[in-house]
Every structure is written in structure tokens, then in C-alpha cells.
């Protein structure tokens, strides 16, 4: 039993607190989801940087970024031209099947795309909508 000088919270005060918590949750949840997608995509960006490095080494040795073994849409690990293996590109979210090459033979430019929809990695279902690209300049793009 409450004494006359003891008081609790009123229903209005409790409702205001619930509304404030709801507003904070409505703002925080979308921000969290965007941050987790960017974190997952960072695995693809790191692998794209590795591939770009291999392309630059190939260019230094051959004077071109590509050769006859590369055709548009070819997977990066085809023919071992770049000395990049499936194991080098296998991650938690993205596998080597995600990374494809776009360019013409004897070109001085290239584009590499990572499409999460093609992944065979353990957590591939979490990145099926993520697409990132890199070109010879190191410019990272997303679709």
C-alpha cells in the first residue's frame, strides 16, 4: 500500500517514454542495416583490390591488361592468367564465381564486377543484392 507522500509514474509519463523509445528504434534500425550491408560489401571491395593489383602486375609484364584468354564476362580465375586462385577470392560472403572481367583484348582499361547473386560462399544469401565494380584507376562503383 502506498503512503500519501509516495508516488509512481502516471500512465501518460509511461506512454511518452514508450513513444520516444519507438522513435529512436525507427531511426536506428535502418542505419544499422545500411552499416551491415557496407561491412559485408567491404569483403568484395578488398578482393576487387587484390584483382586490380594482379591486373597491374600483368600490365607491367605484358603492356596490356588482358590477353586472348580473357573475354567479356569471363571469371577472373579462368586460365590462371592473373595468378589469382579460387581460394584467394573465397570469403564468408563472396566466392570466385562473383568476379567477372569486362574489357577488350589488348586494352588499356578494364572493369571487374563482383555480383553477390553469383556467390557460392557459405553466407551468400546475405549478399545477393550487392554489386561492386572496380576499374583500372581503382574507382569503386556500386549498382
Image (cartoon, helix red, strand yellow):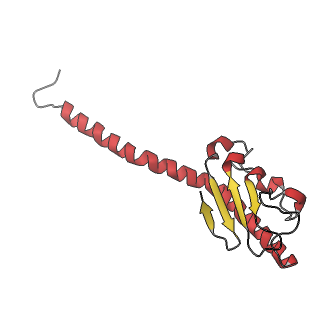
Residue 16 horizontal side relative to residue 136, left or right: left
Residue 132, given in percent of the width and then of the height, sits at: 64, 58
Residue at 13 percent across and 26 percent down: it is 3
Front residue of 42 and 99: 99
Q: Position of residue 81 (x, y in %)?
A: 88, 64
Q: Is residue 68 above or below residue 64?
A: above
Answer with left or right where residue 33 lies relative to residue 25.
Answer: right
Q: Residue furthest top?
A: 1
* Lateral position of residue 16 relative to residue 5, left or right: right
Rendering coords of residue 36 (x, y %): 55, 50
**Is 57 left, or right, of 132 in this rendering?**
right
Q: Is residue 103 visible?
A: yes
Q: How many marks?
A: 0
Whole-percent x and y of residue 40? 62, 52
In the image, residue 31 sits, relative to residue 9, either above or below, namely below
Which corner quadrant of the image does residue 26 belong to? Answer: top left
Is residue 102 depicted above or below 118 in this figure? below
Q: Is residue 9 visible?
A: no
**Residue 53 sits in quarter:** bottom right
Name the quadrant containing residue 114. Answer: bottom right
Rendered-image quadrant of the C terminus: bottom right
Q: Nearer the viewer, residue 143 or 90?
A: 143
Viewer-closest of 109 and 97: 109
Name the one closer to the observer, 2 or 64: 64
| Residue 140 versus residue 41 in the image, above or below | below
Identify the image quadrant of the N terminus.
Answer: top left
Residue visible at 83% across and 74% down in the picture: 106
Amino acid at each position: 500500500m502506498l503512503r500519501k507522500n509516495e508516488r509512481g509514474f502516471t500512465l501518460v509519463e509511461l506512454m511518452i517514454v514508450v513513444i520516444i523509445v519507438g522513435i529512436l528504434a525507427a531511426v536506428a534500425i535502418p542505419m544499422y542495416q545500411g552499416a551491415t550491408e557496407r561491412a559485408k560489401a567491404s569483403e568484395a571491395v578488398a578482393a576487387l583490390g587484390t584483382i586490380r593489383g594482379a591486373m597491374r602486375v600483368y600490365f607491367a609484364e605484358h603492356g596490356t591488361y588482358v590477353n586472348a584468354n580473357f573475354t567479356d564476362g569471363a571469371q577472373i580465375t579462368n586460365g590462371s592468367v592473373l595468378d589469382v586462385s579460387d581460394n584467394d577470392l573465397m570469403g564468408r560472403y563472396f566466392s570466385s564465381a562473383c568476379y567477372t572481367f569486362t574489357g577488350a583484348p589488348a586494352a588499356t582499361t578494364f572493369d571487374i564486377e563482383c555480383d553477390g547473386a553469383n556467390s557460392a560462399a557459405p553466407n551468400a544469401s546475405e549478399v545477393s543484392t550487392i554489386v561492386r565494380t572496380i576499374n583500372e584507376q581503382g574507382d569503386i562503383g556500386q549498382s
